[in-house]
Amino acid sequence: MTEKTRQMKILCIGAGYVGGPTMAVIASQCPDIKVTVVDINPERIARWNSERLPIYEPGLDEVVRSARGRNLFFSTDIEAGIRESDMIFVSVNTPTKMFGTGAGMAADLQYWEKTARQIRECSNTPKIIVEKSTLPVKTAQAMKRIFDAGNHKTRFTVLSNPEFLAEGTAVNDLKHPDRVLIGSDTSPAGIRARESLVDIYARWVDRDRILTTNIWSSELSKLVANAFLAQRISSVNAISALCEKTDADIAEVTRAVGMDSRLGSKFLNASVGFGGSCFKKDILNLVYLCRYYGLNEVADYWEGVIRINEYQKERFVVNMLGNMFHTLSGKRICLLGFAFKAHTGDTRESPGIYIAKRLMEERAKLVVTDPEALENARFELQGVEGDVCYTEDPYAATDGCDAVALMTEWPQYAALDFDRIFRSMAQPAFIFDGRNILDHAKLYTIGFNVFPIGKPALTHFHDEPSIGG
Ligand code: UDX
Ligand code: ADP
């Protein structure tokens, strides 16, 4: 431990899904470093200071409780935080820009730029600025220009340290990361700043897992890692459509493919589509960057990953419509799960949002259930025209329904009493398993008409389907 890190004060601007857990783990691993997390949203900060944290993340309560009030603090006083800190992590949101040049594609950097200006105005001592939010390549350079413009009071060194945590496993990912990536410039100040961040992570991460690169490689690696992960899911989902036409089974295909050690077996589950705040946004950033540099073929290639994801979601709705006699009007449909994946309450870009809107467009009556995401589900669907209600109890949610559409792979859903559910539903009863986690043969035996992803449907109708629509 160096003298420098022992006395260090860290500030994190942005108390969201990235900033909160990351700082909680740093504080728990480094009891001698004071870590303060600030946010412009006072309700969010109040929740971080309460017994009910603003995000659901397995294991996070314990980590926060172990450090909060000791060396982990949550506050709305951004300026005081900036003044006293040596190192400032910036993890404010960087949504996709919805106006002007790059609308629907480029990152909206207004929050980042405001933060950079605020840091500049409030700083009297040298600061290391760490980019934590996912940002387009060359943001660090833009930020450095803002910091340097008109500031004669002090010096800023910008590092890129993208976060690779996945929601639902964030605490474990932070405690045992596959790698930590730190990008810096090669000036003596850049190298010194990089070393002090390496020293912090090295308290609990093997040094050979801490990679140092130039700043652009670091920024780009984050976009590329997410693009590769999303591409894998779109590849599987594209093949799931082919499986449904050919009576092949996507689970058998991915098992055979994943046993090739060059490919590996993780991240090969067919689904109703990927969601989450990162994949779509990061690919759009990548596409924008490629178009900016005139690499249109490369941009088209990556855009295909998003196109397949949109197609997969629409295919799911069309499949429901076609199999439920071409009308959903007035039918009661339960969305079993609404979070974009299990073990989180986050609904950003959740496929459930698109499916819910489309089903309401078809005038279905929706019942949404989820163990952690109902508050966010209400927020996502507010103002959408249609009939929708919410309940936490899956049995109440499915009661009287014509169909169940499983959106999120919560393990408790696989353990539900489907005999009971079947008896409470309208007949014929349909199940559309958007995550392939249910026991399809058993559901069929109970009496359900079962529609998995990328596997043969199991139905009790033995005549030819009607052609309608
Ligand atoms: C992702 C990256 O994994 C993480 O490294 C990065 O820091 C942020 O973005 P996250 O969005 O939290 O993390 O979740 P992830 O587990 O990657 O899942 C993303 C989406 O893909 C979810 O909707 C998930 O259900 C879906 N998915 C994942 C599949 O459909 N099939 C799979 O096999 C895996
Ligand atoms: P992520 O998933 O990247 O962590 P979130 O939306 O969960 O994104 O969190 C980003 C946080 O940043 C939000 O709590 C938001 O209120 C906060 N934020 C945005 N702009 C500022 C700002 N200028 N100063 C402080 N906090 C900000």
Image (tube, helix red, strand yellow):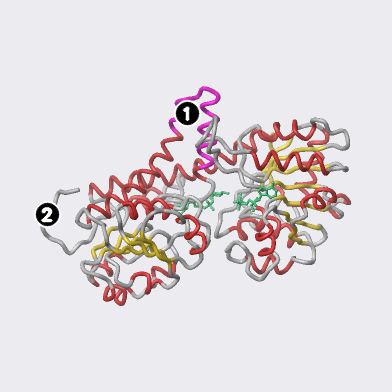
Q: Is residue 279 left or right of residue 336?
A: right
Residue 44 image offset from top left, x and y in percent: 65, 59
The disc labelled 1 sits on which kind of residue? Val
| Residue type, numbered disc 2 | Glu
Q: Tell me the SS state at disc 1.
A: helix
Judge depth for marks 2 and 1 and give the one in front.
2
The range drawn in magenta is: 281-301
Is residue 464 part of the magenta span, yes or no? no
**Left or right: where does residue 76 sit relative to residue 438?**
right
Residue at 43 percent across and 40 percent down: it is 306
Q: Residue 450, how many percent across, how many down?
A: 26, 62
Q: Nearer the viewer, residue 436 or 112?
A: 112
Quadrant of the snapshot with the N terminus: bottom right
Q: Residue 298 — which label? A: 1
| Label 2 to label 1: alpha-carbon separation | 44 Å
Query: In the drawing, does residue 88 fall left or right of residue 453?
Result: right
Q: Residues within 10 Å of mark 1 (few under 14, many from 20)?
A: some
Compared with 351, 130 (above or below) is above
Residue 399 in percent (x, y) is at 32, 72
Task: Label the magenta part by its dominant secondary structure.
Answer: helix
10 Å crowding of disc 2: few (<14), some (14-19), many (20+): few
Magenta stretch containing residue 300, yes or no? yes
Tell me if I can see residue 288 in this picture. yes
Residue 215: quarter of image: top right
Label for residue 242? Answer: none
Residue to which mark 2 is pinned: 464
Counting from the top left corner in percent of width and height, residue 180 is at: 66, 47
The residue lying toward the viewer, choosing from 274 and 177, is 274
Quarter location, residue 444? bottom left
Residue found at x 84% / y 48%: 83
> Can residue 266 be seen in the rendering of this structure?
no
Residue 74 in the figure: left or right of residue 426: right
